[in-house]
């Protein structure tokens, strides 16, 4: 049985959040079927290949049929719930495992808000099914009034709405350790998503329960099958932490923590505990599995960083990117996203010559703290091979480093927080490949 | 002191009555002073530190509570609060031996974590291993080194806490405290941290020191120009 399991797992996509993950060469049949379930237009997947070239290339689908002249026939009537055009079918790439992940196809998206149904997933014990009327949040430990709050209670507090990204700290591990030309932005950085979140400032709840002065940390526990737990310094609660129930105008998606999650803006994804059901206040961290055996960063001096919360500044070009093929020289935008867990992105620079010269890109939206910003730089391709790069600077003055610099200071075996400068190599024939050796 | 977005003229604080019976709340930060400022002139708040009931349009007033929720009884807390910190202060009564733990491992754990604890990566992590290559904590230079309990985990209490809350995969949280002590004992013994004839209870587990506990250091990244 062990051998069978191993063989089966070798055929699935890698589990980015776990140690020892290796690059998956192919999608399993199950992955393809899972992706097909979300496809629109009723197109059938036929001839599922044993080996697909990349996760961005599902089996060919019939092109949707539309009238030759749509102005000569009445259109479709109104509907209760809208659907995407059948000409656009973005999909995550689920591993299909309860401790697995599925990555957002960031190269297919525009603007800065990630559609809720495409927000990346990373679970540690699957997605629990929770009835919001039975879900409660218990707040106890070093507080004056240990309290149990229902979802109705929580929604009666004053609300705030803020836009922040969440990035898995394992985002891009495979691209960092073993960059390969056929990696897409989804594969390289598909675990950073940006959302309009609605909830209550955690500080409001702290005041409500009367947190004692000697409380220095709190434990956040999820209501999933591993009751996932992380310890959080209390200063974050007074800063910008939120208890969140709203995601882009509707309740959280189940895979994003319905009905309640913790949001710690700018901090690594896993600490934004989903399906939140307990907060305990204490004097010291709890040293849970997810802050000791996982989510610690080995360093070249033979130590490992713990509680490495903040996401450093990062950017990635999403267009052009593999598997794009440029149809001839001329003007086109180099376009991508940038973010920092330490505040606002203040500058994104683009190079079209592999880093010899850099040019300041336009920031397409007003940068806000701990949120995605989209950048563009208009480029007149001369038809020769070109290496495109982007690098972000944040308000602390931190500049996104090269991969070589990260390897120097962290080691090739470090486990989390990968933010090297990424590249796209445009060949003379127009084909675009990932260039990871920066 | 900055306020969050607030309606015009809504910051009359001191005179507001709190919700009946809620009483005066404990406010770790200084209560927001009453101030009437046009909303348009207010900067977006960088923090929620002063976001109390007195800073909200129509709220009950500074330092007051809304009074939502019900009191968490001791029984409510006991039902959920199973966590065990690194000092082992919360460890329950009970005990278990390495030998009992090995039998339990074969019944409940082996099908995923493999016969010798080598795991089935990436889904099922390795638990056991103190091979020489992985000694010395060279994980940053060699991505192939496997982080087992023995060569990586800094606290033995974490094994107890995690097994109790999350394992086994098919029946999470179903093990008795005695069984969790026994499994913890087996995993620590197989990782050459404690003796093969050891019996673990709360006192014994509190005394276990993991081989690489002193390798873990605080995060020294602080933003700014230096890349760390």
Image: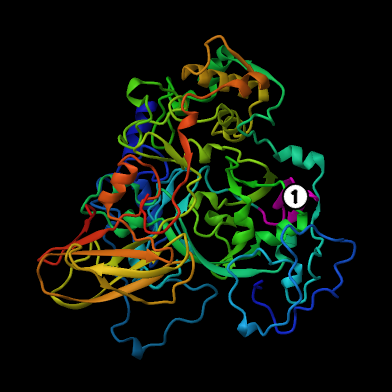
Residue at image x 38%, y 60%? A398
A274 vs A380: above or below: above
Badge 1: chain ID: A
Residue range (magenta) = A131-150
B114 up-or-down from A293: above or below: above
Q: Residue at x 64, y 76 (%)?
A: B5
Q: Which residue is mark 1?
A: A212
Q: Horizontal placement of A356 versus A231: left or right?
A: left
Q: Is residue B116 above or below residue B142?
A: above
> Foreground residue, B24 or A279?
B24
**Residue at horizontal 57 percent and vertical 54 percent from the top:** A257
Check the picture and name the quadrant holding the C terminus of chain A. Answer: bottom left
- The quarter of the picture where the N terminus of chain A appears is top left
**How is colour applied across the structure in the image?**
rainbow
| Residue B201: % across, % down | 66, 19
Q: Position of residue A100 (x, y in %)?
A: 44, 45
């Amino acid at each position: 049985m062990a051998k069978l399991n191993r063989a089966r797992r070798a055929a699935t996509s890698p589990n980015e959040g776990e140690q020892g993950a290796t690059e998956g060469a192919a999608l399993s049949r199950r992955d393809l079927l899972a992706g097909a379930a979300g496809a629109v237009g009723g197109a059938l997947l036929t001839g599922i290949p044993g080996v697909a070239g990349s996760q961005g290339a599902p089996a060919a689908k019939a092109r949707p049929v539309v009238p030759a002249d749509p102005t000569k026939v009445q259109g479709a009537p109104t509907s209760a719930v809208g659907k995407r055009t059948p000409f656009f079918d973005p999909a995550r790439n689920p591993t299909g495992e309860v401790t697995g992940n599925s990555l957002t196809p960031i190269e297919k998206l525009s603007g800065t808000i990630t559609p809720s149904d495409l927000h990346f997933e990373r679970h540690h014990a699957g997605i629990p099914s929770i009835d919001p009327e039975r879900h409660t949040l218990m707040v106890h430990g070093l507080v004056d009034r240990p309290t149990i709050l229902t979802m109705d209670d929580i929604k009666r507090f004053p609300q705030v709405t803020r836009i922040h990204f969440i990035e898995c700290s394992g985002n891009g591990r495979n691209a960092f350790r073993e960059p390969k030309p056929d990696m897409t932005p989804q594969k390289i950085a598909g675990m950073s998503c940006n959302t309009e979140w609605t909830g209550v400032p955690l500080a409001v709840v702290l005041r409500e329960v009367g947190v004692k002065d000697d409380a220095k940390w709190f434990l956040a526990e999820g209501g999933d099958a591993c009751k996932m737990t992380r310890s959080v310094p209390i200063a974050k609660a007074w800063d910008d932490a939120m208890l969140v129930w709203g995601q882009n105008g509707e309740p959280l998606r189940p895979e994003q923590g319905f009905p309640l999650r913790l949001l710690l803006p700018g901090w690594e994804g896993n600490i934004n505990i989903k399906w939140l059901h307990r907060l305990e206040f204490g004097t010291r961290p709890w040293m849970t599995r997810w802050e000791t055996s996982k989510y610690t960063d080995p360093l070249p001096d033979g130590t490992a960083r713990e509680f490495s919360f903040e996401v450093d500044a990062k950017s990635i070009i999403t267009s052009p990117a593999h598997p794009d093929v440029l149809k001839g020289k001329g003007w086109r935008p180099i376009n991508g996203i940038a973010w920092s867990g330490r505040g606002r992105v203040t500058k994104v620079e683009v190079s079209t010559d592999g880093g010899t010269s850099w040019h300041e890109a336009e920031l397409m939206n007003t940068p806000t703290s701990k949120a995605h910003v989209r950048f563009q730089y208009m480029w007149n391709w001369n038809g020769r091979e070109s290496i495109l790069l982007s690098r972000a600077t944040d308000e602390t003055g931190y500049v996104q480093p090269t991969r070589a610099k990260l390897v120097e200071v962290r080691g090739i075996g470090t486990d989390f927080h990968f933010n090297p400068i990424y590249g796209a190599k445009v060949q003379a024939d127009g084909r675009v490949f990932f260039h990871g050796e920066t | 002191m900055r306020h969050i977005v607030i309606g015009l003229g809504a910051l009359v604080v001191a005179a507001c009555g709190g919700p009946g019976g809620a009483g005066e709340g404990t406010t770790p930060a200084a209560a927001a002073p009453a101030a009437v400022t046009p909303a348009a002139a207010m900067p977006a708040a960088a923090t929620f530190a002063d976001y109390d009931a007195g800073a909200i349009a129509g709220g009950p007033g500074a330092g007051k509570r809304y009074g939502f929720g019900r009191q968490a009884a001791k029984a409510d807390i006991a039902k959920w609060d199973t966590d065990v910190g690194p000092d082992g202060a919360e460890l329950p009564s009970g005990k278990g031996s390495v030998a009992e733990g090995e039998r339990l491992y074969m019944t409940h754990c082996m099908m995923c974590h493999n016969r010798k604890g080598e795991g089935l990566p990436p889904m099922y992590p390795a638990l056991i291993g103190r091979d020489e290559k992985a000694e010395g904590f060279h994980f940053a230079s060699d991505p192939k080194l496997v982080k087992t309990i023995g060569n990586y985990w800094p606290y033995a209490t974490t094994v107890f806490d995690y097994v109790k809350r999350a394992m086994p995969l098919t029946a999470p949280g179903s093990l008795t405290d005695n069984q969790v002590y026994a499994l913890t004992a087996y995993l620590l013994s197989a990782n050459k941290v404690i003796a093969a004839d050891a019996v673990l209870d709360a006192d014994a587990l509190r005394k276990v020191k993991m081989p690489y506990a002193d390798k873990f250091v605080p995060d020294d990244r602080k933003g700014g120009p230096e890349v760390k």
